[in-house]
Amino acid sequence: MRVVGAKTPDGVVVGVLSEDGSEVTAFACTSQFWASPDEFLAAGPTGTTYPLAEVTLVPPVLGSARVLCVGLNYLDHVKEGSFKDESLPEVPTLFARWPQSLSSDGAEVPIPSGEDGLDWEGEVVAWVGSRLVDATPEEALAAVVGYSTFNDITSRRAQKQTSQWIMGKNGDRSGPLGPMVPAAEVGDLRDGLTVETRVNGTVVQRSSTAQMIYGVGETLAHISRSFTLNPGDLLATGTPSGVGYSRTPPWLLQPGDVVEVEVERLGILTSHIVDNSHRLNATSA
């Protein structure tokens, strides 16, 4: 099952993409779906079916959702970056995106002005399906309702200008997000799912989720000790080694480049890099 958001003539709905990708069958509107996601997934979609040509795919995300991200969550990525001489912290390094930075499969991602290009970061997103307050790692992992392929596309110049990563991690449409696959169909990330990123067909990242330093359950439990997590919140679990800025010379994405992130059991997420004029001419972000 591949769960997507769709902007339809009847409004934005959460639904299931058909096996051949030609149509979307609705569960409900976004707020209704996230009020009881487990129930909707168990029952299956029973709403209107829309031909894909008549809708626009959008992330099935609440406007109020928190998009939390783990930095430096694969040891090989820590060793290749500017943090390579530092010891690992006892808790995960967290930063945040706004839901408005997210986009869907096939999105055009513009390079902001002042950037030499963009950097890829293929990874997995976990979706929270129930409320978490002071949860144990086991409770937190059990609350995950699904997983998606994600590309945490980064504006490196903006990211490195200060110690805070907000500017570099919230560019327009810079968070392409694949369909959500129910957790029951995915299993435990610690068992190891292959994560591969390709730029114009060339493999630039290849690793396994078994290499993650901080697990999904323990990270969500850690977060829940500071603030309540709600259904529809997202956790991006970090990227492995192979990012562009750590290469010699650095390799950054340019207009015309096509990036694919493929995660075992979750599918392929494709993004198209475009220039800044696509921001200037856009009617909306």
Image (tube, rainbow, N blue to C red):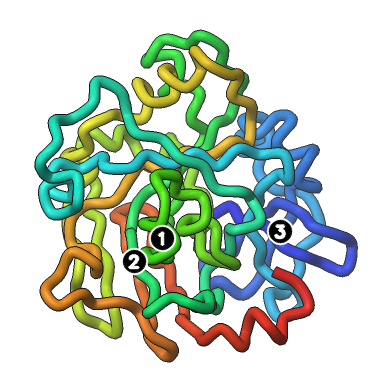
**Which residue sits at x=52%, y=56%?**
167
Numbered disc 2: secondary structure: loop
Do residues under tags 1 and 2 come within 8 Å of each other at their CB atoms?
A: yes
Q: What residue sits right under mark 2 in the picture?
A: 120
Residue position marked by numbered label 1 in the rendering:
151
Query: Residue 61 in the image: x percent, y percent?
Result: 66, 48
- Where does label 3 land, which residue? 25
Measuring 38% from the left and 78% from the top, which residue is drawn there? Answer: 117
Q: Residues within 10 Å of mark 3 (few under 14, many from 20)?
A: many
Q: Is residue 89 visible?
A: yes
Q: Compared with residue 214, is residue 203 higher up or lower down, i.e. above or below?
A: below
Does 19 sit left or right of 239 as displayed?
right
Quarter of the figure with the C terminus: bottom right
Could you tell whether 145 is left or right of 131 in the image?
A: left
Q: Amino acid at mark 2?
A: Trp
What x and y, as percent, mark residue 256? 42, 90
Residue 109: % across, % down: 52, 75
